[in-house]
Image: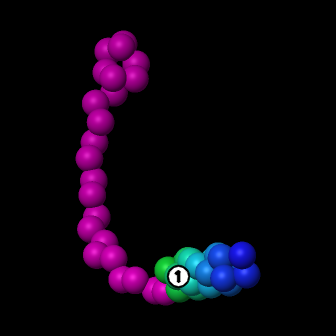
Amino acid sequence: MRLIIIIAVALLVVLGGGFAYIASSDVDVEQQTISQTLPNERFYNGS
């Protein structure tokens, strides 16, 4: 019974540490400027 509790606590610590690492790590993501013009007819029924 005690071994199960130790394993569960260790698993929670590992998962918590992994989440904290992912949340705090700075990953560079490529940025691209995307520009698209939507026609007004979609919103104003052409009037």
Please tell me which residue lies in front, 17 or 27: 17
In the rendered structure, which segment of residues is drawn in magenta? 25-47
Q: Position of residue 28 (x, y in %)?
A: 36, 83
Does 16 appear above or below 35?
A: below
**Element type at mark 1:** helix
Residue 39 lies in quadrant: top left
Location of the N terminus by quadrant is bottom right
Residue ID for mark 1: 18
Q: Position of residue 26 (x, y in %)?
A: 46, 86
Give the residue displayed 40% in from the left and 23% down from the top.
43
Q: Is residue 16 visible?
A: no
Q: Give the quarter of the image for residue 19.
A: bottom right
Q: Main secondary structure of the magenta part?
A: loop
Q: Is residue 41 magenta?
A: yes
Please determine whether, in this image, residue 9 is positioned above or below residue 46.
Answer: below
Identify the residue at image location x=36%, y=14%: 45
Residue under the image location 28 percent in, 75 percent down? 30
Tally the marks. Answer: 1
Q: Residue at x 33, y 23 (%)?
A: 42
Residue lying furthest front: 1
Q: Position of 20 compared to 44: left or right?
A: right
Which colour style is shown?
rainbow
User: Percent position (x, y) of residue 32?
Assistant: 27, 68
Q: Quadrant of residue 7?
A: bottom right
Crowding near the residue tagged with mark 1, few <14, some 14–19, many ≥20 C-alpha atoms within 10 Å: few
Magenta-drawn stretch contains 19: no
Going by the image, does 23 lie left or right of 27?
right
Q: Amino acid at mark 1?
A: Gly
Camera-nearest residue between 2 and 29: 2
